[in-house]
Image (spheres, rainbow, N blue to C red):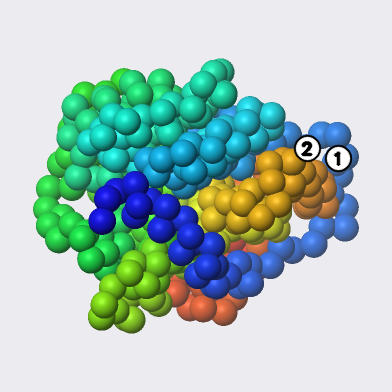
Amino acid sequence: MSRSKRKWDHIQLALTTGQKRLAGFEDITFIHQSLPNTALKKANLCTKIGELHLSSPIFINGMTGGGGEKTLQLNRDLALAAKELDLAISVGSQMSALKDPSEKETYQVVRKENPNGIIIGNLGSEATVDQAKGAIDMIEANALQIHLNVVQELTMPEGDRDFRSALYRIEDIVRKTDVPIIVKEVGFGMNKETVSQLESVGVSAVDVGGFGGTNFAQIENERRERDLPFFNEWGIPTSISIVEAKNGCKGLSILGSGGIQTSLDIAKSIALGADAVGIAGYFLKILMNHGIESLIETIQAMHTELAIMMTALGAESIEDLQKTPIIISGHTHHWLNERSIDTKGFSQRKIHK
């Protein structure tokens, strides 16, 4: 099967398999503040990914490209939405365009439609330094995602089977390229040990890509003659993975993604430690079913609702929201305590003004 056909199959299967909403956010509760001592007009949504300054904590995460005209149109619309709302945007894996130059336009359209925006390139951990430079140049990327997708590759009938030296290749790319490197999981979450290893080789940010959103094991199982059902439930839920990541690093930017669909999910992700939040499958479904105007209106509503929640909590900035007190319960509480991560500290925090 061609890469182009596989790319489009992935999009169709992502829409049909859906999202199970198992990211763990039901275990997170904000402690209500009756005296928040702030006003809605004071809510500031600006944040940073490494040294990249963003006007919003929401970014459009990598989805597609390399699948011919259909994926070109999707990336064009996503880029137009990102431009309209001043959001960062990541493209899908660019390896197909590096191997087949005729697919470059399906990625370059993002920069064409959004010439001054923050655009993030994307390659797998098998990429070489030269491929990384090629991906960056292709779209004049402001940063590059290196995605980790071991479970997807193992489930994919034609996927990779050798994952040796991935950390070394990532370190080589960090040292020999001129943009921030973001390492991203694709739906199975990151633990604190992985994040610590990535920080040690100089990456600028990690995107936890937690379990609970688009399930690429399930997608690839749909393409197998004999499936691997144990991988359908494999991974670390997003809520847990954000805390693990924050606990495993000293100064990395933490990006939350995986099953995030609402402004409340976004607020909870930030309260758990995320600096920004990536959304892919949910935005893709809105775009394909209802069009670009509906996507723009949805994100605008998310911004408004997030500012309203921040006001109710007494948070005037993303940094404040990361300090607001929360209660962690259920499976998330049990997991984190078993991993020797203190959950009581989250409930004792205060926003200092």
User: Which image quadrant for residue 73?
Assistant: top right
For the point 25% across and 60% down, the residue is 153
Query: Relative to residue 168, is residue 227 depicted above or below?
Result: below
User: Which amino acid type is marked by label 1?
Assistant: Leu
Q: Residues within 10 Å of mark 1 (few under 14, many from 20)?
A: some
Element type at mark 2: loop
- Percent position (x, y) of residue 7? 38, 51
- Percent position (x, y) of residue 301? 78, 46
Nearer the observer, 56 or 247: 56
- Percent position (x, y) of residue 107? 42, 32
User: Quick check: marks 1 and 2 in contact, CB under 8 Å?
Assistant: yes
- Percent position (x, y) of residue 95? 28, 39
Per the image, the residue denoted by label 2 is 43
Which quadrant would the C terminus be assigned to in this image?
top right
Left or right: residue 39 versus residue 137 is right
Query: Relative to residue 309, is residue 138 depicted above or below?
Result: above
Residue 157 in view here: yes
Left or right: residue 188 versus residue 317 is left
Which quadrant would the N terminus be assigned to in this image?
bottom left
Q: Residues within 10 Å of mark 2 (few under 14, many from 20)?
A: many
Left or right: residue 67 versus residue 178 is right
Nearer the observer, 307 or 324: 307
User: Which amino acid type is marked by label 2?
Assistant: Ala
Q: Spatial distance from mark 1 to mark 2, Cα to Cα?
A: 6 Å
For the point 63% across and 72% down, the residue is 26
Which label sits on residue 2? none
Per the image, the residue denoted by label 1 is 40
